[in-house]
Structure formats: structure tokens, C-alpha cells
Amino acid sequence: MASGWTELPDDNEVLEQVYVKLENIGFRVGRRLAERYAPVGRRLTDTLDVVKFVCKDMWMVLFNRQVDNLKTNHRGIYVLQDNKFKWFLRMSSNHGGAAAARRAQPYTWLPCGIIRGVLDSFGVNAVVSPETLGLPQCTFQIKVVANE
Amino acid sequence: MSLTFYFAIVGTNDSPLYEDRHLNQFIAHAALDLVDDAQFMSNSCYLKTVDRYNEWNVSAYVTPTNVRLMLLHENKAEDSIKGFFTDCHELYLKTLLNPFYEPNAPIQAQAFDTKVHALARKYLL
């Protein structure tokens, strides 16, 4: 799909459909990964514990490294910052910073879905949005939706 | 009619994903609340005996994503039940990794049924 493009399609609708598909695939994968790799010894009760599980164990399984920085406002927003995002390490572009970051965006959608899937299987309802300021750095913002 | 045991897998919205014999379903379902209470007391997955009803004991095992495995039995050794639950959990994981299986849907594969029975013969009989 994305490997067949030389430029991102300008059509926002196509991009939207790709986003929905990738994110949903990521969600399904995330649910299965969570059950498979969830720690059997201790129980993850706190939302912060679940996010830490994503940052350490899930990132280790997926990318063989841990998330560099985790920030939270303790009111439902968590920001995961990966300074050397594995899938961006080999990317370079003739067009420079912002354009390259925009072209790399679709690669962040699958991990967004995976994070959402892992959170969902522990009962945490959230929305995950990616942000790339410059390759190879990538940020994922988790916004927990309180459902009571 | 001798029922030695009854085994069920209960999904996250309290609907049964797999059960062995339907007769004791309501005993298992009634014990779900006790499972919920017990799971916050304990830190491990295996909850031992959660409830007693006449001659039946209800044992439970809760996976990290809140899927409950329930077993009705008449006084079996706890170690063998724990082994049974662990193996059933692995079997459930394999079912879950199948991309055609939707989480929380009933498990209808014949192979799953055969394997559960084989595990039961190994650990419980």
C-alpha cells in the first residue's frame, strides 16, 4: 500500500480510509498481544500501570526497545515519546523535515491501534493520536475517555 | 447420571464462550460475583475454590484481561486443577491468536473441544 506510493495521495478521503483500516488492524493485534504478554504474576489495576506496561513490555515485544519518555498530567492524558522509532530509522527523504514527517505518518497508525487495543483489553477506553515532529522521533498521545 | 465436572470459559461481558455441559451453568454464573470479589484480593491468576453449592465446589482462574475460567467439581486436588487451568489458558491464547477468531465470541471449534477433554482426562480424572 504505502510502499507503492511515491507521494502521499492528496485525497484526504483515501488517507482517512487507510487510517481507519490500519488502526482497526492494530486494535485487533493489540488485544491479542495484551492477552499473550500480560504479566501473570501481578495484576495491572491502575491505568498508569497499564500505560507503563505498554511502554516497557509491549514496546520491547514490538520494537526491541522501550519508550524513551512517558509524561502524564495525571488526569487521563499520557504522552509516550520514542526518540528513535524503529520504523523511522531507515527513512530519509529528498524533501526534508516536515514533508518527510508527513510521508511517514501512515506508519504510526498501526502502533496507535495496537496501543488502543492493549489498553482496551485491560478495560481502559482511550483515543490514541500520533505526532511526528522530525524523523526518527515519534510521539503517541493517549487520551483516556472516562466512561462512567 | 454422574457428572464429574463442568468447565466453562466466561468472556469479559459475562457471556459463556465455551462450556462443557449446560446443566450447571447457573451455578457457575452465580459464582461470577464471588470471582470478581476474590480477584481483587489475590495477586495471582488462580483463585482456588471460590464457592460451594451442595456437593459442588466452584474454582476459578482469571486471566489478565478478565476472561474467567470456571470449573465445578467435587473435591479434586488443587494442584491438578491449577495445572488444568494453566493449560486451558494456553489453549485459549492459541485460539485468540487466530485472526479469524473474534474476542468474546463463542468458541465452536471441534479441535478445541477435543483438546479440553484431553486435558480434563489428564488432570482431573
Image (cartoon, rainbow, N blue to C red):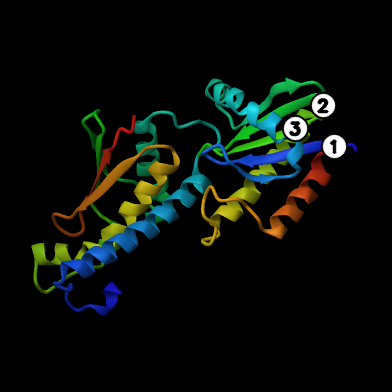
- The answer to whether residue B115 shows anywhere in this view is yes
Q: CA gap, disc 2 to disc 1?
A: 13 Å
* Mark 3 residue element: strand
In the depicted view, which residue is nearer to us: A103 or A64? A103
* Mark 2 residue element: loop
Residue at the image point whose x is 76% and y is 29% from the top: B78
- Verify CB contact (< 8 Å) between mark 3 and mark 2: no
Percent across and percent down for residue B92 are 62, 49
Q: Quadrant of the N terminus of chain B?
A: top right
Labels 2, 1: front one: 1
Q: Chain of mark 3?
A: B
Q: CA gap, disc 1 to disc 3?
A: 10 Å
Q: Chain of mark 1?
A: B
Name the amino acid, label 1: Leu
Q: Residues within 10 Å of mark 3 (few under 14, many from 20)?
A: many
Residue A28 vs A77, above or below: the answer is: below
Residue at which label 1 appears = B3
Q: CA gap, disc 3 to disc 2?
A: 9 Å
Whether labels 2 and 1 belong to a single chain: the reply is yes
Residue at which label 3 appears = B72
Q: Residues within 10 Å of mark 2 (few under 14, many from 20)?
A: few
> What's the mark number on residue B75?
2
- In this image, B9 relative to B120: left or right? left
Labels 3, 2: front one: 3
- In this image, B7 relative to A75: left or right? right
